Image: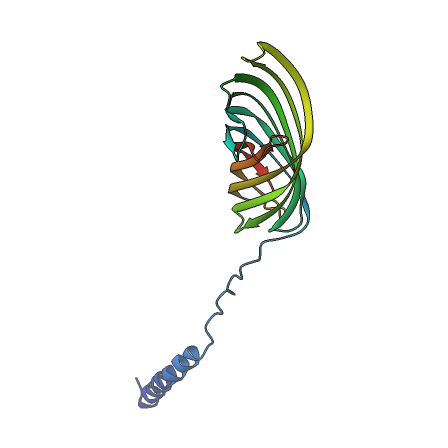
Amino acid sequence: MSGARRRTITLATALSLAALPALGQAQSTRPAPASPPAQVAQPARDGVRLRGGIALVAGPYLPYGTTNLQSTGGAAGLAVRFGAQFNHYVGLYVHSQNLGGAIGAQSTSGTVSGAVMFHSQNALLASITIAHTVEMGAGPSLDVLAFGNCDSASLSCASGINTGLGAHARFALLLGGWNPSGPRRFGMSISADLHPIKYVGQDGGLLATVFGLGLDWF
């Protein structure tokens, strides 16, 4: 190989080696690929919607206050709810609880009586829901009480239907999730309802203490 050709190859090799650091530096200054944007949690959708529910209910009727009758009993039945949920916190709905049961009573004079009954409690409840799980509601009620009773004093039986105004309170634990297409929630409900029944002309009566297991859309 001639001297001129060897010098040409040596020069080309030197130039190539000299360009390597510059090439590496250019690659190192190339910007890193951008990371995907962080996912921002979307707030739960809210708004006015219809609400409803259904439950199987049962529980004791317990005496309260001062009366001339010491009564106790129990009842079971079905409760339905329908109304409006204004947002995740406030609702207004009708709670209709229809129960069948029996009550026994003993008066201060020793008279013993017993009754079978159908008790329809129709309450308008304003409710507050806390953390999408705990609900508390209260409001007035229109009651219908149909009964048939017998007593040992007169050795006779009678029946009748009474209507009147009352009060109702409801406490519920709502266990469920979200409807992905809207703000409505859905869940199983575990509830306790308190409904006093005042005896006419007396300072007490019976407290219907009813527990329920059902479903709610709210």
| Rendered image coloring scheme | rainbow
Whether residue 36 is situated above or below residue 125 in the rendered picture: below
Q: In the displayed structure, does residue 5 sit left or right of residue 29?
A: left
Of residues 45 and 41, which is closer to you in this image? 45
Quarter of the image with the N terminus is bottom left
Q: Residue at x 54, y 29 (%)?
A: 57
Of residues 117 and 192, which is closer to you in this image? 117
**Residue at the farthest front position:** 109
Residue 178, image x, y percentages: 56, 45
Of residues 36 and 80, which is closer to you in this image? 80
Q: Residue at x 54, y 24 (%)?
A: 76
Residue 116, image x, y percentages: 57, 17
Toward which corner of the image does residue 102 lie, by quadrant? Answer: top right
Q: Residue at x 62, y 19 (%)?
A: 147
Whether residue 47 is situated above or below residue 214 in the rendered picture: below
Residue 28, image x, y percentages: 41, 78
Q: Is residue 211 visible?
A: no
Q: Is residue 158 visible?
A: yes
Q: In the displayed structure, does residue 131 sit left or right of residue 50?
A: left
